Amino acid sequence: MTPAATPSAIVVDAVSVERNGVRVLESVTTTIDAHRVAVIGANGSGKSTFARLLNGLIVPSSGSVRVAGLDPVRQARKVRELVAFLFTNPESQIIMPTVAEDVAFSLRASGLPREEVSRRVIGILRHYGLDDLADRPAHELSGGQKQLLALCSGLVREPGILVADEPTTLLDAANTRRVSDALIALPQRLIVVTHDLALAARCDTALLFDRGRLIAQGDPGELIARYERELC
Ligand SMILES: Nc1ncnc2c1ncn2[C@@H]1O[C@H](COP(=O)(O)OP(=O)(O)OP(=O)(O)O)[C@@H](O)[C@H]1O
Ligand SMILES: [Mg+2]
């Protein structure tokens, strides 16, 4: 018998998604309870669509999604508090002129006193090695630094879950290692969509997508081997 989902689980039940008349996800059912989850599969297999269901950026055409018991569509505000989303291109997430201002912007609705906001901003920038760049224009950072900045902006408000869509794709080897290490060490639940199979291998479990279907879920090593054997 399958164990009951814990209250913090992500439960996806018979979800299909149609976009512009095309069925891009086909009856996906899964319960995610692991701490670090890799989402792998070929280009166009539905990984980003799946990831975007988890914070309501994409609405199921049928079926249901629950994230820690919350409906990402009907309870969008609560779900966005719980789930931080990291896009492939960190440029798209930079909002404010400087590094520190950009991170602080994430706390604008927190109601925290200004000193506490500054303390948290500096604390997280220091943790990810960006504190020396706090007053630099955010758009002048390198690609890897921007990805770390996006991570800081997402994490500073202490979400329960981080969903990251190909966070290392634009990075060189050193920054890939840096961002991967940061992701793997997070206390938050991590759902990471990735073509970086070394990063996928470091997760606790994996989901394998193929042409809009979730075809397997389980040990990352086994799924990576199946992906390379059957689908590459
Ligand atoms: N707005 C849209 N209208 C029609 N089809 C779409 C739309 N957005 C995505 N698709 C299709 O949905 C399918 C799944 O796309 P998705 O972005 O989820 O794939 P992916 O697995 O993330 O791929 P990649 O590895 O290339 O990022 C693709 O075939 C894509 O062409
Ligand atoms: Mg994608």
Image (cartoon, rainbow, N blue to C red):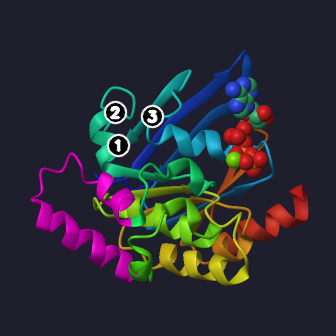
- Which mark is on residue 80? 1
Q: Is residue 206 magenta?
A: no
Q: Closer to the N terminus: mark 3 or mark 2?
A: 3
Q: Amino acid at mark 3?
A: Gly
* Quadrant (top left, top right, bottom left, bottom right) of the C terminus: bottom right
Q: Amino acid at mark 1?
A: Arg
Describe the element under mark 1 as helix, strand or loop: helix
Describe the element under mark 3 as helix, strand or loop: loop
Nearest the eye: 11 or 164: 164
10 Å crowding of disc 2: few (<14), some (14-19), many (20+) = some
**Left or right relative to 101: residue 36:** right
Is residue 191 visible in the rendered structure shown here?
no
10 Å crowding of disc 3: few (<14), some (14-19), many (20+) = many
Nearest the eye: 4 or 39: 39
| Residue linked to disc 2 | 76
Q: Is mark 2 within 8 Å of ligand 1?
A: no
**Left or right relative to 53: residue 40:** right
Q: Which residues are magenta?
A: 100-127
